[in-house]
Amino acid sequence: MGKTLAEKIWADHVVREVAGEPDLIYIDLHLLHEVTSPQAFDGLRLANRQVRRTDLTIATEDHNTPTLNIDQPIADPVSRLQIETLRKNAAEFGVRIHSLGDANQGIVHVVGPQLGITQPGMTIVCGDSHTSTHGAFGALAFGIGTSEVEHVLATQTLPLVRPKTMAINIEGSLPQGVTAKDIILAIIAKIGTGGGQGYVLEYRGSAIRELSMEGRMTICNMSIEAGARAGLIAPDETTFEYVKNKPHAPTGADWDAAVEYWKTLKSDDDAKFDVEISLNAAELSPFITWGTNPGQGAPLSGNVPNPADFTDPEEVGAAERALTYMGLEAGQPFKSIKVDTVFLGSCTNGRIEDLRAAADVLQGKKIAPNVRMLVVPGSAKVRLQAESEGLDRVFLDFGAEWRQAGCSMCLGMNPDQLTVGERSASTSNRNFEGRQGKGGRTHLVSPLVAAATAIRGTLSSPADL
Amino acid sequence: MEKFISHTGTAVPLRRSNVDTDQIIPAVYLKRVTKSGFEDGLFAAWRNDPEFVLNKSEFAHGTILVAGADFGTGSSREHAVWALQNYGFKAVISSRFADIFRGNSQKGGLLTVVLPQEGVEKIWDAIEADPTTEVTVDLEAKNVRVGSSVYPFEIDDYTRWRLMEGLDDIGLTLKNIDDVTAFEKKRPSFKPLTLPAKI
Ligand code: SF4
């Protein structure tokens, strides 16, 4: 019987296999940021251990970094301490770091691909659940806890139990105005926030093959929101083209050898997945969330659901609580919902294509009264690229704020937060209670919906303009 | 991680059940950047009460915590284990532990001993009657000894072996580090390196 892509990558990384024990898996790349690494470094220090492979390790600052006045000391002492600690640890252990102010600083999942250190067939880990993003390259990539971060630092391996595999087949072409974000929000609404638990999701089909690398990253990024630790897309010419000529891409004979290997990285025709589900791309439309978990989503053209219409009593209760928290009425058209803040950014939608797509909609328009819009590039390099294309002017002329790179309002660990009762349309990935600031209300949307919403002041798609 | 074969010390009676990890260490204490120093957050809310058992001088130096049923429920924070260890505890005795807490404690070498509730009650009585009573938690013999009383306990062989060898997961992997080195020799040269940096 053939193998799935996940099984092939797994098999290529087994260091040790003993019956009754987890497999010991080699890790090709370890990404670090300031929040989940300090205790791991402290553990190394206490045990007198070194980082085994500093040349497979890289750190950046993202979760706590301010997006204004980055030339001044960070005001919040806790954030400052976490960042200073990362810098100190990187210096002490010899780990490469891209600090605030550096052109390669940014959200860890944006920085890896842009440096070309995210490549097909790799195993990639980070103390961050959205590490699944890198699966877009056909790499097995997943988030880990602090003890595991320490384990990887010390040994470059992890003892892991082999996951099950789920194929998600999306055939057909996306209608105009429908994006990768809408695909993944629709998938999560379909399978639920626990639907992917224990699985690696492999996204397949013509709709996936037609996506750009950045669209594929948006999809894999949110695999964790369906409960899966990893998402995968088989690499193809689009992938090779994207990696080629990136700073750390292989060159010369290494490039040829790499591509030859990468071409073998697809699920065999006779491979068997534990579960398969299908979606028709042509039936999709712009999608939004109305509740307080990413599975509570629906097409933007619809109305706020009535909790009584759910069959599962758990879901009824969850929907009731969500509507109360979100301040919504059952039956209210989504397009009538007024928004205070629009956030364009995050590791889901903070890449150059996302900024271009939004700028295209905003060009020549003015922001709705009483709406603020934050545009936060995913990395300093994305910011520079956008400025070289004049996108910053488009955003500023429209009335949006053009900020420095980082996680920003995705999780509100820095000063960019919603206030109690404030409502946002956000291109990020989590709409949990309080995620963007205590009492804040989040609707997850695509960059196109974010832009149209900023123009009209109510949840909207470009087709409504 | 330190080997745990047998430990003798004095014990602290915590006559409460359902002690969740939010009580063991409240969220405001999680901002620290070290794995050490969490002792100040241990039972922080309860320690404001002068009558709380850890505030009594006769129990201030105990190294074995004897708690009510369902110890360690709630949030999965690994900091709860660190806080107990940082404070000086080597073992916790209870009639039932929450799964995640037990898993975390085994990662860090904090021994969790499951005894029937009546055994827990007897130990409470003994240490309250005389706080200087020596208590021995013997992993090799699989029993707890308090004065002349012996309380046997069960623990699975793999976990017992790991704790007695002082092997955390990292220690275990390091035992097979030659396999890792051999694997590294076969890795293709086209795999990317982060150093030297190219930008
Ligand atoms: S942008 Fe948001 S989801 Fe992504 S790494 Fe930062 S905080 Fe996490």
Image (cartoon, coloured by chain):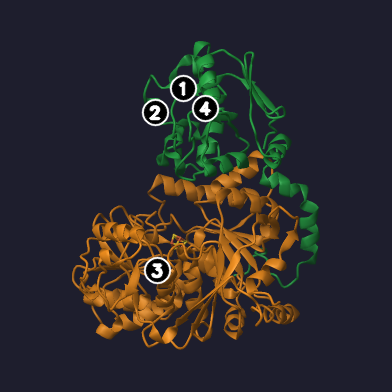
Chain colours: A orange, B green
Residue B107 placement, left or right of A321: right
| Three-letter code for the amino acid on which mark 1 is drawn | Leu
| Marks 2 and 1 belong to one chain | yes
Q: Position of residue B115 (x, y in %)?
A: 57, 29
Whole-angstrom CA distance, mark 3 to mark 1, is: 48 Å
Residue at the spot of label 4: B117
Residue at the spot of label 2: B46
Q: Position of residue B166 (x, y in %)?
A: 70, 37
Q: Residue at x 30, y 57 (%)?
A: A317
- Nearer to us: label 3 or label 4: 4
- Nearer to us: label 3 or label 2: 2
Q: Position of residue A287 (x, y in %)?
A: 35, 75
**The C terminus of chain A is located in which quarter?**
bottom left
| Marks 1 and 4 belong to one chain | yes
Ranked by sequence position, the earlier of labels 2 and 4 is 2
Residue A345: mark in rendering: 3
Residue at the spot of label 1: B54
Q: In this picture, is B15 found above or below A221? A: above
